[in-house]
Image (spheres, helix red, strand yellow):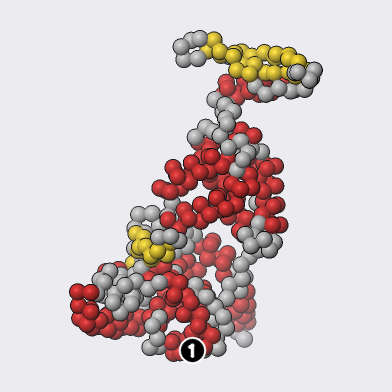
């Protein structure tokens, strides 16, 4: 493979130097490919040498007219739609169609530089909110960074880019999220104050297991082993925009699939609920929607996740308990276990975290300091017999 520099004078009288690659096509016919022009011969020769080197080692990607927007649309349809969970896909689609494409989607793939991406991050941090009231948080822009990085990694695999320009960018560092949890006394007040209400049982299980809202609302009776006192997470319930409620099987793709041990009191509570549900089945007869759900409306239809969260907030306000979200019951469960001295590995397994490091990162700032003090006191007592 050879190349040379061609000198040309434009209509305006400007001299430009063009790298020209000489190669043979599949039929053996000689072909010439002209690359972009440069102001000096030295610049053109340097670019030609780089291209010839990349072609020799197999990393050269021919310049394309495909824009970033064209590629991201294709990536969403050909990859993300079939390889990610529906809710994850909706998140990717929103970030790409509402943020990335309107801002930098017109840039051609072969011209996309780290500077463009860095500028995009800066823009989103200062004026990225859809309501026009300022910028997005560091954490939100970090999500954009991860989506763009994953997409452009595929662009490299699909040989549309030689390297991923996102690799040269340092994403914004998010502030550590402050979690809110209930005390033991507040948990007791919550359970006593909501007993008899529609969503008492989902609240009860969240407090006692740390399960996610979707995991609780998708739980089936077949997932509960009353003999061995365990719950298996095999299905979740999600509410998708434009689709509605949807069950998702987690047995093959979801890393959060796990088995959780439950106490005797939880077993007895669930048995009482099953008795109530059996009466509802008889009352509704053939109109009962039997999804085998543990938590559902009287006619067997699934609970709406949004309604559960909304009503939970009303319960909290009525009971004059500090404001927390339904998801914070998961944090409460983990925190109370750690405060009792439970090993973080056990807590991590109950929550379904992929590593114990995630658990430690989430709870270290507000739980571990007190545990450190307690450990120091215990050691002092042990050593000096105080």
Q: Residue furthest front?
A: 11
In the rendered image, the vertical position of residue 268 relative to residue 60, given as above or below: below
Within 10 Å of the Cα at label 1, are there few (<14), some (14-19), or many (20+) other Cα atoms?
some
- Tell me which residue sits at (20%, 77%) in the image: 285
Q: Position of residue 160 (x, y in %)?
A: 54, 33
- The extreme right residue here reads 13
In the displayed structure, would residue 228 be above or below residue 239? below
Return the x and y of residue 135 as percentages of the image width and height. Answer: 68, 59
Q: Is residue 166 left or right of residue 42?
A: left
Quadrant housing the N terminus: top right
Can the viewer see residue 271?
no
In which image quadrant can residue 162 be found? top right
**Mark 1 — residue?**
189
- Decide: is 96 above or below 113: below
* Percent of width and height locating residue 165: 63, 40
Residue 120 horizontal side relative to residue 259, left or right: right
Q: Nearer the viewer, residue 291 or 284?
A: 284
Name which quarter of the figure residue 384 lies in: bottom right
Q: Is residue 39 visible?
A: yes
- Residue drawn at point x = 48 percent, y = 41 percent: 74
* Residue at 65% from the left image edge and 21% from the top image edge: 35
């Amino acid at each position: 493979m050879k190349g040379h520099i061609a000198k040309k004078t434009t209509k305006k009288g400007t001299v430009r130097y063009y790298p020209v690659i000489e190669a043979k096509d599949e039929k053996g016919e000689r072909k010439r490919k002209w690359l972009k022009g440069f102001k000096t011969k030295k610049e053109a020769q340097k670019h030609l040498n780089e291209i010839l080197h990349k072609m020799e080692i197999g990393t050269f990607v021919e310049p394309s007219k495909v824009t970033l927007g064209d590629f991201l649309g294709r990536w969403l349809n050909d990859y993300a739609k079939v390889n990610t969970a529906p809710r994850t896909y909706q998140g990717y689609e929103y970030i790409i169609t509402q943020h990335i494409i309107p801002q930098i989607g017109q840039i051609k793939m072969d011209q996309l530089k780290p500077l463009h991406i860095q500028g995009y991050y800066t823009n989103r941090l200062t004026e990225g909110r859809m309501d026009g009231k300022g910028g997005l948080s560091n954490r939100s822009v970090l999500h954009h960074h991860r989506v763009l990085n994953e997409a452009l990694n595929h662009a490299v695999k699909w040989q549309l880019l030689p390297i991923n320009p996102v690799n040269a960018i340092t994403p914004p560092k998010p502030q550590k999220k402050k979690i809110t949890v209930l005390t033991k006394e507040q948990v007791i007040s919550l359970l006593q104050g909501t007993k008899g209400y529609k969503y008492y049982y989902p609240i009860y299980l969240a407090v006692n297991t740390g399960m996610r809202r979707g995991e609780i609302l998708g739980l089936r009776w077949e997932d509960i082993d009353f003999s061995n006192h365990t719950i298996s997470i095999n299905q979740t319930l999600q509410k998708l925009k434009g689709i509605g409620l949807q069950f998702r099987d987690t047995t093959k793709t979801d890393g959060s699939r796990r088995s959780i041990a439950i106490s005797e009191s939880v077993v007895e509570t669930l048995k009482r609920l099953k008795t109530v549900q059996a009466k509802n089945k008889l009352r509704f007869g053939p109109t009962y929607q039997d999804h085998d759900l543990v938590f559902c409306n009287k006619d067997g239809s699934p609970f709406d996740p949004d309604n559960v969260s909304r009503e939970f907030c009303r319960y909290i306000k009525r009971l004059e308990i500090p404001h927390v979200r339904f998801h914070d019951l998961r944090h409460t469960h983990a925190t109370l276990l750690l405060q009792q001295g439970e090993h973080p590995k056990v807590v991590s397994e109950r929550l379904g975290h992929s590593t114990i490091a995630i658990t430690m990162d989430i709870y270290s700032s507000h739980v571990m300091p007190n545990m450190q003090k307690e450990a120091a006191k215990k050691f002092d007592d042990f050593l000096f017999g105080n």
